[in-house]
């Protein structure tokens, strides 16, 4: 198939910005705090951190490497390295499929955030009455048609950006907005320390307690380490395919991992003190960030402005992640099936939008929600989240790690590892990474999965 010269990042920082944009998103601010709450904090956070360092980061390096070596998106990457009929292409397909599943419900949550921007703009968050804010989320998520419309709006925005090829513009904006998000959390953190519930919140996140840790908790921590770093579906592989030969993969991966983890931990250290100060339950579920942040803002001067900035930044963080998800889905049709971009992006976008409608309706009491939950114990929304994050990403990540650690030639792999990287040339680091990717990563994934299905 005829291919134009493949794009490259304009600068070294281009890749870091795009990849960090993909990583930092709702996973950090919305999902991590809420699953931490549900799993009792403490030990769950420690397991998550171990998964990030021992599994997520090593796979990220392998994934970006495969992208740069092949200059392809996931499916093509495996074909290029292992031949036309390679079964490894299945790993790529699994990644593309996860992209569809994840974005479908991710966009629903982003839609809530979008609606919150409007709610904040209307001044509703300066009521001075925190209790109102917790009811407000029920109204937003419980309004099926409304939630669907906001989901459609967010998808339309994502599609428009990816078709328009203005990702570059978004990445440049990210250069300002991402540090702003960090600053926002820093300010909130300072505020949180003044709350009566700070000590309890801090202890919830970092204290050692195991009471709420269930059979599925370890799988959830593992799955979330993939989700939050955007690994195990080909997003990092695709972004890596635009890297130049002398770009530093190791330094970039480490930087992205640190930023992502910082945001996630800060989000917890802000949200849980608020939870305990107002006597709420840590296991509030998906509503956590949407009630706690407005509750905190309700009582400080300038609450409308604060809330407006916060939710705008959250939408923006979600957008840069959504772009990478849609990019992987459409790249498959463009690179593998020869579709034009202007066809592939809307077709994928529309499919994902439709796939997300049941998730948007999940929280409206009148419809969907209860029926499916009664039948299989999980709503559509929860099922999509559970299957993609806890099973699809780790399985695809397993494939990526086995391929990168066992199938690639050692010479070529080492060159990739060391290129342009001071860190990568550090004595022994390559061998350490390789051994971890060869043994620790696959063993951890398999053991955790077997544990989750109750084998031991
Ligand atoms: N990492 C993103 C987040 O934390 C979500 C995501 C997952 C993006 C997989 C791309 C691929 O919000
Ligand atoms: Na993340």
Image (tube, helix red, strand yellow):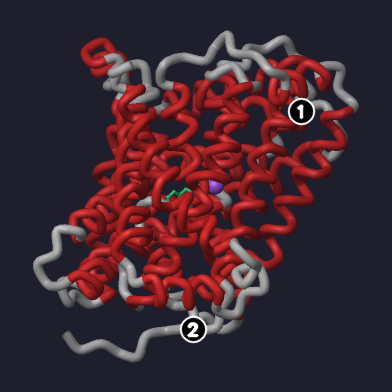
Asked if one can make out residue 325 in the rendered structure from this viewpoint, the answer is: yes
Depth check, front residue: 421 or 173: 421
Depth check, front residue: 5 or 441: 441
Residue shown at the point (80%, 38%) measured from the top left: 188
- Residue, disc 1: 296
SS of the residue at dot 2? loop
Residue 2 at x, y percent in the picture: 20, 89
Q: Mark 1 or 2, which is nearer the eye?
A: 2
Residue shown at the point (57%, 25%) measured from the top left: 44
Asked if one can make out residue 169 in the rendered structure from this viewpoint, the answer is: no
Residue shown at the point (68%, 60%) measured from the top left: 177
Depth check, front residue: 133 or 454: 454
Local crowd at mark 1 within 10 Å, few (<14), some, or many (≥20)? Answer: many
Quadrant including the C terminus = top left
Asked whether, in this view, residue 211 is left or right of residue 6, the answer is right
Q: In which quarter of the image is residue 339?
A: bottom left
- Residue, disc 2: 245
Depth check, front residue: 94 or 286: 94
Give the tally of numbered discs.
2
Q: In which quarter of the image is residue 305?
A: top right
Residue shown at the point (38%, 42%) measured from the top left: 149
* First-in-chain label (1 vs 2): 2
Q: Quadrant of residue 445?
A: top left
Q: Is residue 289 placed above or below 325 in the rendered structure?
A: above
Q: Is residue 333 placed above or below 395 in the rendered structure?
A: below
Asked whether, in this view, residue 55 is left or right of residue 379, the answer is right
Quadrant including the N terminus = bottom left
């Amino acid at each position: 198939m005829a291919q134009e010269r493949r794009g490259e990042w304009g600068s070294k920082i281009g890749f870091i910005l795009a990849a960090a944009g993909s990583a930092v998103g709702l996973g950090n601010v919305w999902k991590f705090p809420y699953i931490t709450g549900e799993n009792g904090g403490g030990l769950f956070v420690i397991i998550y951190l171990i998964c990030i360092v021992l599994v997520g980061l090593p796979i990220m390096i392998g994934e970006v490497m495969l992208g740069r070596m092949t200059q392809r998106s996931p499916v093509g990457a495996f074909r290029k390295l292992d031949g036309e009929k390679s079964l490894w292409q299945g790993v790529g397909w699994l990644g593309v499929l996860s992209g569809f599943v994840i974005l479908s419900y991710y966009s629903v949550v982003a839609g809530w955030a979008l609606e919150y921007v409007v709610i904040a703009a209307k001044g509703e968050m300066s009521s001075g009455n925190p209790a109102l804010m917790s009811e407000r989320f029920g109204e937003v998520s419980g309004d099926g048609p409304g939630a669907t419309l906001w989901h459609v709006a967010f998808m339309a925005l994502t599609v428009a950006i990816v078709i328009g090829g203005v990702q570059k513009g978004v990445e440049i904006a990210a250069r300002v907005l991402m540090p702003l998000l960090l600053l926002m959390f820093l300010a909130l953190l300072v505020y949180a320390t003044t709350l009566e519930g700070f000590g309890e919140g801090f202890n919830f996140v970092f204290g050692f307690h195991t009471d709420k840790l269930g059979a599925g908790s370890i799988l959830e921590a593992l799955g979330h380490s993939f989700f939050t770093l955007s690994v195990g579906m080909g997003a990092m592989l695709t972004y890596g395919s635009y890297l130049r030969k002398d770009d530093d993969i190791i330094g970039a991966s480490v930087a992205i991992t640190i930023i992502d983890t910082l945001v996630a931990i800060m989000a917890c250290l802000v949200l849980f003190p608020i939870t305990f100060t107002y006597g709420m339950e840590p296991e509030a579920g998906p509503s956590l960030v949407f009630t706690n942040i407005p509750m905190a803002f309700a009582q400080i001067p300038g609450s409308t402005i604060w809330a407006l900035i916060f939710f705008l930044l959250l939408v923006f963080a979600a957008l840069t992640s959504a772009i990478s998800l849609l990019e992987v889905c459409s790249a498959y049709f463009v690179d593998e099936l020869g579709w034009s971009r202007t066809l592939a992006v809307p077709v994928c976008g529309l499919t994902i939008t439709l796939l997300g409608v049941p998730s948007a309706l999940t929280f409206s009491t009148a419809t969907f929600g209860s029926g499916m939950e009664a039948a299989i114990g999980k709503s559509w929304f929860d099922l999509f989240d559970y299957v993609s994050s806890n099973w699809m990403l780790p399985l695809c990540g397993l494939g990526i790690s086995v391929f990168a650690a066992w199938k690639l030639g050692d010479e070529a792999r080492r060159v990739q590892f060391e290129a342009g990287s001071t860190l990568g040339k550090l004595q022994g680091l390559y061998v350490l990474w390789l051994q971890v990717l060869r043994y620790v990563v696959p063993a951890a994934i398999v053991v955790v999965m077997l544990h989750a299905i109750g084998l031991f």
